[in-house]
Image: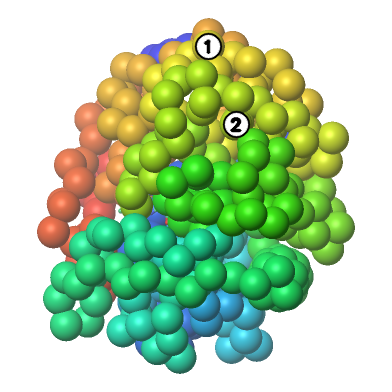
Amino acid sequence: MPLSSTLWQPFALGRVELPHRLALAPMTRNRANPDGTPGEFAAEYYGQRASLGLLISEGTQPSEDGQGYFNTPGIYTPAHVEGWRKIAEAVHAGDGHLFIQLMHAGRMSHPDNTPHHRQPVAPSAISAEQDTFTPTGPQKTPVPRELSSDDIQTVIAEFRHAAASAIAAGADGVEIHGANGYLLHQFLSPNANHRHDVYGNSIENRSRFVVEVARAVAEEIGADRTGIRISPAFPLGGIDEGDTEAVRAQYRHLVGELAPLNLAYLHIHHLGDDELLRSLREIWPTAVLVVRYGRERDDIAADIDADLADIAPLGRFALANPDVVDRLRSDAPFNDVDPATLYGGGASGYTDYPAMATA
Ligand SMILES: Cc1cc2nc3c(=O)[nH]c(=O)nc-3n(C[C@H](O)[C@H](O)[C@H](O)COP(=O)(O)O)c2cc1C
């Protein structure tokens, strides 16, 4: 059998039994309807990939404020719930399990991309100074509005509501997006969080919001249906978390605070500090998922073999190969990704990547 044998062993993650150690990594595809309901082909897209076992959805906003990009789905209105129900059913029909990624973009947004067209919100009024896509082309992310302490409680309540909505739609759980420069990551990062209250100014305080969101979501739907994604030192969205030691201290503290919640999993978008990764794995009581950007096919099982991870989510390989699991099992070649159809559009580059029999 290609790759390691451990990769093909089943795994119990929270309440679900996974057939192997692969998963679908969360990927934004910008094909939702303008009202935030999932797009016409979304159920088919996820259903085609059900053999991945654990399917983590594209980033999905828990509120109007949480939307960062246009044509991304939400999970906070009854219409959103009905839309996601079709996806959950399609995934379950193929014996897969769906975790909806709750993504609040924070300052990585633009008034042209949200339904209410208001100024984005963030821990502090500091612009990410990034170019972002809007319906009229690339624009700079504006200076966000600093969340008050009352606002922070509102955002936590929105996460709670979104998590409950995901479960109402038939999802098996949610993944809290604490990575990649979005709102939770902005709270963790000293260059995005200049607060002087209990949510800023120290490692402990910068971790507080993330821990409170995780606790609220776990209380709402069960810790065993709650995962969280982090990305230590990842500079996306203008994030700068300092030198190696600063990053290690921040994330060892954060993960130490999250560990007693006994969440279903910790998902790490890993940049390469294996010493940090190993120490986080030692602290963490349940499953660890590790993604390394651009990991080669031959290395898919490397972190599992090195006992640094339990599960290896796949991003672009799974995007371009609905039957990636079968292809790996049988050592068959992969389809290539079409970069032009990653974000936005219809069925092309979404549901029309061929499976092996027709490749
Ligand atoms: C088109 C695309 C969209 C993505 N959207 C998200 C997202 O919504 N949430 C997230 O946490 N990561 C997102 N990512 C990152 C992936 O989850 C993954 O970490 C990354 O692609 C590295 O894995 P790969 O090399 O297997 O593709 C996205 C990646 C791609 C290629």
Q: Compare marks 2 and 1 and give the one earlier in the sequence.
A: 2
Q: Nearer the viewer, residue 216 or 358?
A: 216
Q: Residues within 10 Å of mark 2 (few under 14, many from 20)?
A: many
**How many numbered callouts?**
2
Coordinates of residue 352 in the picture (x, y in percent):
25, 61
Q: CA distance from mark 2 to mark 1?
A: 14 Å
Q: Where 217 sits versus 7, above or below?
A: below
Q: In terms of secondary structure, where does tag 1 sit?
A: helix
Residue drawn at point x = 21 percent, y = 41 percent: 335
Residue drawn at point x = 74 percent, y = 29 percent: 256
Coordinates of residue 187 in the picture (x, y in percent):
56, 52
Which quadrant does the C terminus fall into?
top left
Q: Where 352 sits versus 232, above or below?
A: below
Q: Amino acid at mark 2?
A: Gln
Q: Nearer the viewer, residue 222 or 183?
A: 183
Q: Which residue is mark 1?
A: 275
Q: Where 245 sits versus 236, above or below?
A: above
Q: Which residue is mark 2?
A: 250
Residue drawn at point x = 63 percent, y = 15 percent: 279
Q: Nearer the viewer, residue 337 or 144?
A: 144
Coordinates of residue 191 in the picture (x, y in percent):
44, 46
